[in-house]
Amino acid sequence: MSLEGLVAKYIGSTEHVLKNMKTVEDSININAENIGKVVEYVKAYLKDAKYYRDRKKFEVSLASVAYCEGVLDALKLLGAVKFEWPAKKKERKREK
């Protein structure tokens, strides 16, 4: 897959998660306000990823969106949010 293709895939996955994730109430001393602040950072990095993609700076775009995914995964591991990456859903469907 080309670098441009990877950027498109990761941006699409991150947008999907941001639209569908749920905040977990009473997660380990993390209140909804703080979760919201972190999600705003994720959205800012996603905006950067799109900005650099549109300017064909795919290396920078990929780094930005990969950071988004890492922060989202960290929130998930902490139990602060619930979501599934689109690729994981497809894998589970194939397993059935």
Image (spheres, rainbow, N blue to C red):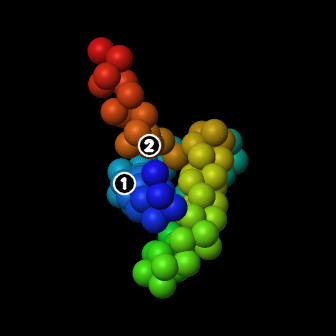
Q: CA distance from mark 1 to mark 2?
A: 8 Å
Numbered label attached to residue 16: 1
Density class for disc 2 (Cα within 10 Å; few <14, some 14-19, many ≥20) is some
Pick whichever, 12 or 7, lies toward us: 7
Q: Amino acid at mark 2?
A: Trp
| x, y percent for residue 35 | 59, 59
Residue 72 appears in the picture as rendered: yes
The residue drawn where x is 52% and y is 46% is 81
Numbered label attached to residue 85: 2
The residue drawn where x is 63% and y is 60% is 67
Decide which of tag 1 and tag 2 comes sooner along the chain.
1
Question: Callout 2: helix, strand or loop?
Answer: loop
Numbered label attached to residue 34: none
Q: Residue furthest top?
A: 96
Q: Amino acid at mark 1?
A: His
Question: Callout 1: helix, strand or loop?
Answer: helix
Q: Are marks 1 and 2 in contact (CB under 8 Å)?
A: yes
